[in-house]
Amino acid sequence: MRGLDPRILLTASPLAKGWPGLAPGNDDERADPANGLRVAIFTGNYNYIKDGVAVTLNRLVDFLERRGVPVLVFAPTIETPAFESVGEVVSVPSIPIPSRSEYRIALGLSKKARRRLDAFAPTLIHIAVPDILGYQALKFAGKRNLPVVASYHTRYDTYLKFYGLGGLERLGRRYLRWFYNKCLMVYPPSDSMAQIIREEGFSDSVRVWSRGVDADLFSPARRSLEWRRSLGVGDEDVLVTFVGRLVKEKNTDLVVRIYKALRQRGIRFRAMFVGNGPEEEAIRTALPDAVFTGFLVGEDLSRAYASSDIFLFPSESETFGNVTLEAMASGLPAVCADASGSRSLVLDGETGYLISASDEAGFIDRLSGLIESAPLRARMGKAARRRAQEFSWDDILSGLLQSYADVVAAYGVNN
C-alpha cells in the first residue's frame, strides 16, 4: 500500500491549523464530509466488556450513523454482552486470553465475516487494535486498494512489564512500528501520546483524536453525603478514589503501597476503589478498611466520583484517561502518573498533580498535602472542573469525521 504525501494531506485538510474545528471559510460551500463514506471498524472489544475503548467506539459509531455514514463493526462477541452496543456488529472468532479470561483475542476474519465485509464495500478501514484481526484488516485493505486509518487506544508495549514479559517490549515496539506505518493516519487521544508515537517511529502521520466528557452527568452536583454514609464514610472523611479495572497494568500495586505509607504517617483518610478485576482480592486483603463499590455506570458512577474528594490514578498504560477526565469534570483534584494521557489533561499544580510512576514518595507527599488541606482541594477541584468542560464530544467527533474525509480524498488523489 502506498503512503500519502503529507503535503497533499496538509493542503486538502481544512483542519491543518488545529483540532477540533474547521478552517475559516464559507460553510455552505464545503462538501459534507459524510458524503460517500462507508466505514468498517475492527476492534478487539466492542461490547463484551465496558471499558474505555468500547465506550469510545460506540460513541463514534452512534455519531457517524446520526450523520448518515454507514458503519460496520468487526469484533469478538459473547452470548451475554456487558451492554447494548450501537450499530451492526459482525462477530469474529476469538478465544479468552490466558490468565485474563475476561478479555478475548480475535483470531481474524471468518469466511462469513469476509463475505459481509465485501458486501458492505467500505471506503475507509479503521483499525482500533493491532492484533490478528487488525493485521487481516490491513491486508484486506491492501488487496482492495482502500485507505486505512488507526486509532491508538492502549499502550500495549507497557503492559508486558506488569506480567514479567518486559524483555519482549523491544519486539513489541518493532511490530507496532511496522503496523502503524502501514496506516495513512494514526489517531492518538492526546498530544503527549502523539509525541510518543512520533518519537518511537510508529508514524509521522498523526492527528489527535481527543475524548470528550458529559459535563452534566459528571458534575460536582452529583455529590451525595447520604450515599457516602451508606458505605460507612463519614461526612468529614477525606475519600481518595481509584476508578478503573483492578488489574496490574493500572499500577494497582503502587496504589496499595501509597495507601499503606499514608497510614503509617498517621494521615487520616478513606480509600475507595470503583471497578473490578483480577487484582480485587489481593487489594481487599492488603487494605481491609477500603471501600469497594464494584463496577458502576451512568448516574451511579457519576455519584461515586462527585462523592469523593481526591482522584488517584498512577497508571502508565493510558493513552488518554477517560476516568481522569470524568473525575475532573466531577470537581476532583487528580493525582496521576506523569505519563501519556494524563499529561495532556492534568495541569500540574493547578488541577492536580503529575508525578513520575517511579516516585512513590512524591505521590505520598502530594496526597498528604491534599488530604490535609480542604482549601487546596476546593481550589484544584474547581480548576479541574473548568478544564474538563473544554472537552466537547460534538466538536471532537466532527473533527474526526472531517479527517476521515480528508484521508479518503487525499488517497484518491494519490492512487
Image (cartoon, helix red, strand yellow):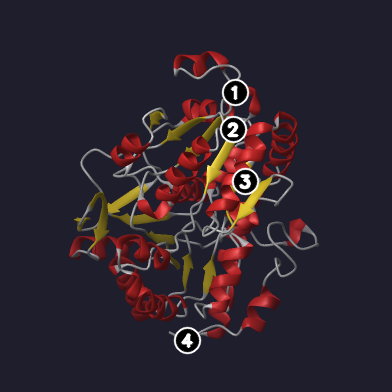
For the point 40% across and 59% down, the residue is: 41
Q: Nearer the viewer, residue 346 or 15?
A: 346
Label annotation for residue 218: 2
Q: Is residue 140 visible?
A: no
Tell which circle, 1 or 3, labels the residue nearer the N-terminal end.
1
Q: Is residue 208 visible?
A: yes
Rounded to the nearest whole Å, what is the CA distance between mark 2 and mark 3?
28 Å
Amino acid type, callout 3:
Asp
**In the rendered image, which residue does mark 3 sit on?**
365
Classify mark 1: helix, strand or loop: helix
Amino acid type, callout 4:
Arg
Q: Mark 1, residues whose alpha carbon is within 10 Å: few (<14), some, or many (≥20)? A: some
Amino acid type, callout 1:
Arg
Label annotation for residue 2: 4
Amino acid type, callout 2:
Phe
Which numbered disc, 2 or 3, marks the residue closer to the eye? 3
Cβ–Cβ under 8 Å for marks 1 and 2: yes
Q: Mark 4, residues whose alpha carbon is within 10 Å: few (<14), some, or many (≥20)? A: few
